[in-house]
Image (cartoon, helix red, strand yellow):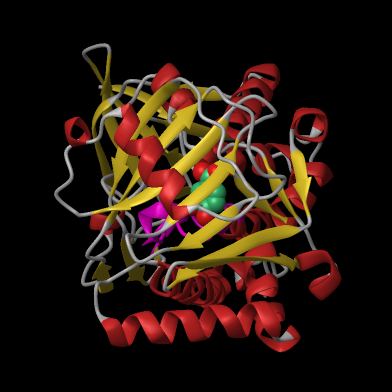
């Protein structure tokens, strides 16, 4: 078996793993990243597009925000809309006025490309297309990963292993007797990308008796939309016309028109909340989707992964460079507090905005929407969570 050695072995080359490698490198800690997919696959996955304030602050601080500054778009807030007995209202919630914090529209796909470019520039070792990744000896001082690469078996020895390999990767299964919490929602999202200028300056989250809809964007010429659909939805059931009609109905507002254009991508996304603790076992640490999944409403997934890694990187640096394990020992408990805050916020946004067909739910949702758009206290709670709490929260 071929043997390699590094300080930190990172499983998964998505944004969590690549950002961690970047942060460690800045402090002189060496890492190797292993990934089952191809580089092109990881870089082209379409994910959410909203960066919260702390994510942007961090990317700026580490010199990864040049393209974000040029091509990203800062938003002051969001629009919330509902349609009650045929009458629609749309209200703006201004995060900057309410909390002094804003958000940026910049796709996770773009963040990933920036991380990959930076990794290439510094000569970061990333092994793509590995198979059979397994974690070993996590309770000892000599943990390792084994995997096959081009048919060759490799053992990667490290001081620490970090699982950034999502909910389907092997890392979370390497934590014995975890505690898990799980919620599957009774609806999914149909997401599309379209070559059409956004019909709105900032995102619109729309509650409608037929189902939720979200108008987001990627640039001045590309719009992103989501429609609430039943869980067993097949893409073939939704022709382009049906999609545009569904969106037009749910966003309908006097004096406003939805522009349409060619649809360039479509997919159905399940909605799930999942948390697994502890986020550490011996010399294994979990970050991002390996330990938690949030439903997409509110776009917390990437931001939460960034927060995990921003907490973990200095903890590993202190441990490996100064033999000070106090931050590493605190990581699991500190990280999981923010995880539950974002889990609650994502659940709250999701349940406020999705039609269930239950008339009691409907009245509660409308009342909640009226409160968060008419009371500064209600709006500030949404704004603080959406624009994001400071990393150290
Ligand atoms: C996007 C996705 C979200 O889930 C959200 O809440 C906002 C924006 C997006 O893909 O643009």
Tag count: 0
User: Where does residue 177 sit, x and y in percent of width and height?
Assistant: 21, 72
Give the residue displayed 39% in from the left and 73% down from the top: 351
Residue 52: within the magenta?
no
Q: Is residue 322 visible?
A: no
Quarter placement of the C terminus: bottom right
Please name whichever residue, 328 or 370, is drawn nearer the observer in this view of the structure. 370
Q: Is residue 340 above or below residue 119?
A: below
Quarter placement of the N terminus: top left
Residue 295: within the magenta?
yes
Specify start and end residues of the magenta stretch as a single range.
Answer: 281-306
User: Where does residue 248 sit, x and y in percent of width and height?
Assistant: 45, 45
Please name whichever residue, 392 or 224, is drawn nearer the observer in this view of the structure. 224
Position of residue 31 in the picture relative to residue 153 (left or right): right
Give the residue displayed 81% in from the left and 30% down from the top: 66
Q: Is residue 250 visible?
A: yes
User: Where does residue 11 sit, x and y in percent of width and height?
Assistant: 40, 40
User: Where does residue 81 sit, x and y in percent of width and height?
Assistant: 56, 64
Give the residue displayed 56% in from the left and 32% down from the top: 259
Position of residue 225 in the picture relative to residue 119 (left or right): left
Q: Residue 169 is drawn in which quadrant? A: top left
Please name whichever residue, 294 or 22, is drawn nearer the observer in this view of the structure. 294
Position of residue 88 in the picture relative to residue 375 (left or right): left
Give the residue displayed 75% in from the left and 34% down from the top: 68
Q: Residue 246 is drawn in which quadrant? A: top left
Q: Residue 23 is drawn in which quadrant? A: top right
């Amino acid at each position: 078996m071929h043997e390699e050695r590094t300080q930190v072995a990172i499983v998964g080359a998505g944004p969590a793993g690549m950002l961690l490698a970047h942060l460690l490198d800045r402090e002189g800690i060496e890492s190797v990243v292993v990934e089952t997919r191809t580089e092109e696959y990881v870089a082209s996955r379409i994910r959410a597009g909203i960066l919260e304030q702390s994510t942007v602050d961090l990317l700026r601080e580490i010199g990864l925000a040049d393209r974000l500054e040029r091509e990203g778009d800062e938003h002051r807030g969001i629009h919330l809309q509902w349609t009650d007995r045929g009458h629609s209202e749309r209200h703006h919630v201004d995060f900057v006025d309410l909390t002094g914090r804003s958000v940026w529209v910049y796709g996770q796909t773009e963040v990933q490309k920036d991380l990959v470019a930076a990794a290439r520039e510094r000569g970061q070792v990333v092994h793509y297309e590995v198979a059979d990744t397994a974690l070993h000896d996590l309770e000892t001082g000599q943990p390792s990963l084994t995997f096959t690469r081009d048919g060759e078996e490799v053992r990667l020895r490290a001081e620490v292993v970090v699982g950034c390999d999502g909910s389907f990767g092997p890392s979370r299964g390497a934590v014995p007797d975890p505690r898990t919490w799980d919620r599957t929602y009774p609806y999914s999202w149909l997401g599309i990308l379209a070559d059409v200028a956004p019909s709105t300056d900032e995102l619109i989250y729309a509650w409608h008796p037929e189902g939720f809809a979200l108008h987001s964007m990627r640039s001045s010429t590309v719009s992103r939309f989501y429609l609430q659909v039943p869980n067993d939805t097949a893409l073939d059931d939704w022709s382009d016309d049906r999609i545009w009609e569904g969106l037009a109905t749910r966003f309908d507002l006097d004096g406003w028109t939805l522009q349409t254009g060619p649809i360039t991508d479509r997919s159905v996304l399940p909605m799930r909340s999942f948390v697994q603790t502890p986020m550490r076992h011996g010399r294994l640490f979990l970050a991002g989707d390996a330990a938690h999944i949030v439903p997409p409403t509110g776009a917390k997934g990437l931001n939460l992964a960034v927060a995990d890694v921003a907490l973990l990187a200095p903890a590993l640096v202190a441990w490996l460079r100064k033999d000070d394990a106090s931050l590493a020992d605190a990581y699991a408990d500190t990280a999981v507090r923010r995880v539950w805050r974002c889990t609650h916020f994502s659940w709250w946004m999701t349940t406020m905005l999705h039609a269930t067909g239950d008339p009691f739910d409907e009245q509660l949702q409308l009342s909640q929407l009226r409160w968060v758009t008419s009371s500064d206290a209600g709006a500030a709670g949404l704004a603080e969570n959406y624009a994001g709490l400071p990393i150290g929260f």
